[in-house]
Image (spheres, grey):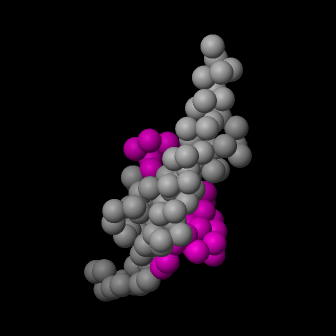
Amino acid sequence: MDSQQKKGLLELMVLASLKYDDSYGYDIKQNINDVMEISESTLYPILRRLDKQGFLETYQTIYNSRVRKYYKITREGIEKLKQSDSDFREVKMLYDYILR
């Protein structure tokens, strides 16, 4: 898969992993690794970028006497996921045309 396509899909996978529950980096990585292997050095820049773009919010909580940073999808992040659904349908139509 083209690295630019993969980059865009990873961003959507991060948002999708947060659609129903807030989570922290390692847990997000584990969830995504069920589908596509991702390293922490790839994940954390994506999390920072999505946060900076307003698709995620962060907060901290104490877990086992340590501070843990959690990520929460924003309304804008939910809208981005909805738009990706529409985009996927359009891309699928193009692929169906190419492959027929």
Q: Is 45 part of what is drawn in magenta? A: yes
Q: Give me the residue at 34% from left, 62% from top.
A: 20
* Nearer-the-camera pick, 56 or 35: 56
Q: Position of residue 19 (x, y in %)?
A: 39, 61
Q: Give me the residue at 47% from left, 63% from top.
A: 78
Quarter of the view holding residue 27:
bottom left
Quarter of the view holding residue 88:
top right
Quarter of the view holding residue 5:
top right
Query: Which contiguous range is marked in magenta?
Result: 32-58
Using the rendered image of the protein, determine whether residue 79 is visible from the camera's viewpoint: yes
The residue sitting at the left extreme is 64
Q: Is 34 part of what is drawn in magenta? A: yes
The residue sitting at the top extreme is 100
98 with respect to 92 (left or right): right
Q: Give me the residue at 56% from left, 54% from top.
A: 83
Q: Position of residue 9 (x, y in %)?
A: 58, 48
10 in relation to 68, above or below: above
Question: For the image shown, how many numbered marks are present on the structure?
Answer: 0
Using the rendered image of the protein, determine whether residue 38 is visible from the camera's viewpoint: no
Q: Position of residue 18 (x, y in %)?
A: 41, 63
25 in relation to 29, above or below: below
Q: Give me the residue at 56% from left, 50% from top.
A: 84
* Nearer-the-camera pick, 68 or 22: 22
21 with respect to 44 (left or right): left
33 in relation to 53, above or below: above
66 in relation to 86, above or below: below
Quarter of the image with the N terminus is: top right
Quarter of the image with the C terminus is: top right
